[in-house]
Amino acid sequence: MRFLVLFPAIFSFFLIFADTVRIYYLYEPLSDRYTFTNQCADLRSCKPLYVTKGEVKHKAGYKINPGRENQFDEIIKSASQKHGVDFFLIKSVIKAESLFDTKAVSSAGAKGLMQLMPDTAAEVGVKNVFDAEQNIMGGTKYLKKMLKKFKNNAKSAVAGYNAGPAAVVYYDGVPPFDETMNYVEKIHDFYKIYTGKELW
């Protein structure tokens, strides 16, 4: 396996062409260290730097309304208190991910209110992704992990929630993927609507 050595002179090249040059990463959990490479012979040992969460699909006729938007506030409050994550940040993530649809499913397989991918759901101990309480508690646990990893930098944390922490580490901030950049902007806008304050 050949590894990338990202000298400053070529780093900008990969920033521009990372969506055409396939980048993979290996993660060492004990040291919390990522190694990046442009070759991967076995996807059991390395993973793509970025995989889209896909388009979220709702049942025909699904609409968001104030009653539905506030329906999960008690669960969000409990998750906020348990994991030490801003109530309105959690709520903004739910709105951006699923529009408060417990049955939302993306084309890539993300499910439920906080659109947990199967691996993420397993990591945070969620057995039923369509159960509102399990999904919110699990999603908030993962969001807390992102906040801790990126030293409470909310912008990097929500980017990591969407694109995965490896991509944020690789780009040293919000990755230049349209999906992730739009997602980060949505979170900021929703948070400002809820609180009247800037998130970052």
Image (spheres, rainbow, N blue to C red):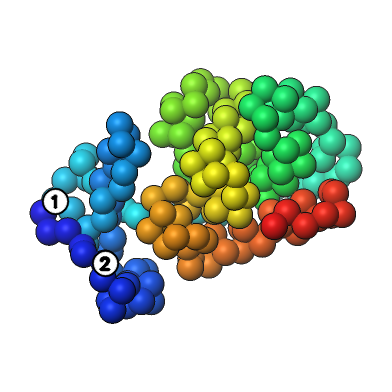
Identify the residue position indicated by label 1 in the image.
41
Residue 171 appears in the figure: yes
Residue 136 appears in the figure: no
**149 and 130: which is toward the camera:** 149
**120 and 144: which is toward the camera:** 144
Instruction: Tell me what residue is drawn at x 26 percent, y 67 percent.
Output: 6
Instruction: Tell me what residue is drawn at x 17 percent, y 58 percent.
Output: 3
Instruction: Tell me what residue is drawn at x 61 percent, y 54 percent.
Output: 155
- Please identify the quarter of the rendering in which residue 198 is found: bottom right
Which of the two discs, 2 and 1, labels the residue nearer the N terminus?
2
Figure check: 54 above or below 74: below
Q: Is residue 61 left or right of residue 176?
A: right
Instruction: Tell me what residue is drawn at x 52 percent, y 61 percent.
Output: 174
Kind of residue at badge 2:
Leu
- Viewer-nearest of discs 2 and 1: 2
Identify the residue position indicated by label 2 in the image.
6
In the rendered image, which quarter contains the C terminus?
A: bottom right
Q: Position of residue 176 (x, y in %)?
A: 48, 68
Kind of residue at badge 1:
Ala
